[in-house]
Amino acid sequence: MNVRALSGFAGVAVVGLVTAAAIAAPWITPWDPFAQDLGARLIPPAWMDGGSAAHLLGTDQLGRDYLSRLIYGARISMMIGVLTVLASGLIGITLGVLGGFFGGLVDDVVMFAITCRLAIPLILVALTVVALVGSSLTVVILTLGLLLWDRFAVVARTTSMQVRTLDYIAAARAAGCSRTNIVLVEVLPNIAHHLIVVATLEMALAILLEAALSFLGLGVPPPLPSWGLMIAEGKDYMFFSPWVIVIPGIALFVLVLGINLLGDSLRDLLGGRAAR
Amino acid sequence: MLRFLLRRSLLAALVCLTVLVISFALTRLSGDLATAIAGQGATAADIAIIRHNYGLDRPLPEQFLTWAAAAAHGDLGRSFLYHEPVAGLIWARLPITLTLGLLGLGIALVVAIPLGIVAALREGTAIDRAAGLIAVIGQAMPSFWLGLILIIWLGLKLQLLPISGLESWQGYIMPAVVLSFSAIPSLMRLTRGGMIDALAADYIRTARAKGLSQGSIVLKHALRNAAMPVVAIAAVQLGFMLGGSIVIEAVFALHGVGYLAWESISKDDFPVIQAVVLLLAVIYIGLTLAADMLNALLDPRLRTA
């Protein structure tokens, strides 16, 4: 097995495992992730001195089981990732295909929209919107969805521009297909493999951004066990109990790494020569 | 060339204007600003006075025009929190954020370009894959978390570097390194891709046929051609890094523009938020415009675009 296949396999394994854990969270968590036990605060993970087998990854500053919170946190990260990509993909692909397929004035408008979007400072605007509208999971998903469509638009635009000139589009046109029909049946399926790769990149970015927003106190509100929020809450205890920030950080890193590796191997599988 | 410059500048001005509208609209999202400014426990009369004093009782388009006209003259309003002109607040903190961004970009270039060159020269080998792995890891690293880990490890365990603040220049090292992580993957990949294309070009074969040394071929002939898109992306990355430094400044308690923005957001200081959004957008637009022009200057083929 070569390195490429191995990293692709690792990506599939990580994303698959985290997805399974996110779905099965209520059945596999040993404790209630919200149940506080002030008598059992900041217990270290089982393999460290003072750890207990009852709490494999220890407990947090309120005595909540860290493993259970981590597993429920996977739910939040995956929801953010998938739903944000659905929203941003819808916006970006629509704009990109419109610009790339129709060209001319439509394309100018789309290009202008992309330029404006890139000029807007991402984290700052996301923080402001969440602060003004009020923090909740839905608000974070919608905000990120409204901001992360630029790469979808760029890729959808360039690829549909290339597809536009191909023979099968001319053939469909000659056969009397409507424009809507051509876009939906001929263009979209033929650029889909590029868009799937973008989707993995954006999903990874959305998960990282949610963690950063929650870390700054303007993302997912407590007591939800977002990994970013777990790091923020553990920050005050990190000097004496470093694992409270190490554990959710590693989870975040591994999930994002897995999604990126999955995206890379999808590009290799679907992209052919462009894979380089 | 002149037409190209004019077109690009006009486009940049239009983008600026759009961002101006967006940053204004953004702070009106919350509904009633006057209530937010007055805070809890304010009477209806207090709110009415505030609404009138801040001009919030006038129609939105008029409010926008007043603000935009003042902003065009460098008057960005007064901070609700500091009771000082916003421009002064930002001006005092800008050097910190700019130093951080430039240092971060410098570190990213010093790491990414040699790595990209080596990966291109050894395309398909274990070295190439190792470089690719570094890029993937850099991409997946949560920057705020890396910052905290470095604080624990370098600051507390080894006591090599200060854990926060800027009492000495060493305070910049950790934040700049963390910030550089976000730019390394794309710069590395771009250098690698550009070098692979350049090394396969005819002029490289000519250079080899002339008997030039490998070092001269790689550095003088190939890199010069591969460097152009890297320079352009580096400018864009600097724009992104200045925007992203808000997280780093919060982690390391550096009182730059990002920290000011974070503070303002959590305390509803709208004039400051508007101004920082605008400033970062204008810097980004300026950087991309400069990169476009530099590219057009170096490559006449781009001028028709």
Image: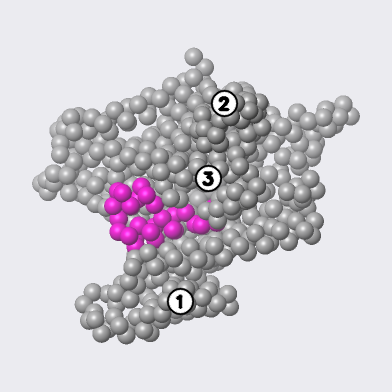
From the viewer's perspective, tell me whether residue B89 is left or right of residue B3.
left
Residue A48 lies in the magenta stretch? no
Callout in the foreground (2, 3):
3
Residue A80 lies in quadrant: top left
Badge 3 sits on which subunit? A
Q: Which residues are magenta?
A: A118-143
Q: Is residue A62 left or right of residue A89?
A: left
Q: How is the image coloured?
A: one colour
Q: Amino acid at mark 3?
A: Leu
| Disc on res. B63 | 1
What residue is pinned by disc 2? Answer: A271
As drawn, the label of residue B193 is none
Position of residue B276 measured from the top left corner of the image (x, y, whole percent): 49, 66
In the image, farthest residue toward the top: A1
Seen from the viewer's position, the closer of residues B64 and B121 is: B64
| Residue A59 located left or right of residue B88 | left
Can the viewer see residue B148?
no
**Helix or strand or loop: what does disc 3 sit on?**
helix
Residue B288, compared with residue B44, is above or below; it is: above
Percent of width and height locating residue B182: 51, 46
Q: How far across and down, in percent of the image, does residue B255 sit?
A: 44, 65
Q: Which SS type dominates the magenta stretch? A: helix
Please rate how many residues cluster around mark 1, counting C-alpha atoms within 10 Å: few if below 14, some from 14 to 19, many from 20.
some
> Residue B237 at x, y = what percent?
58, 50
Instruction: Bin the neighbour count of mark 2 within 10 Å (Cα to Cα): few under 14, some 14-19, many 20 and up.
Output: some
Q: Secondary structure at mark 2?
A: helix
In the image, what residue occupies the spot 15% across and 36% down?
A31
Q: Which residue is mark 3?
A: A95
Residue shown at the point (46%, 62%) measured from the top left: B258
Residue in view at x 22 percent, y 50 percent:
A223
Amino acid type, label 2: Gly
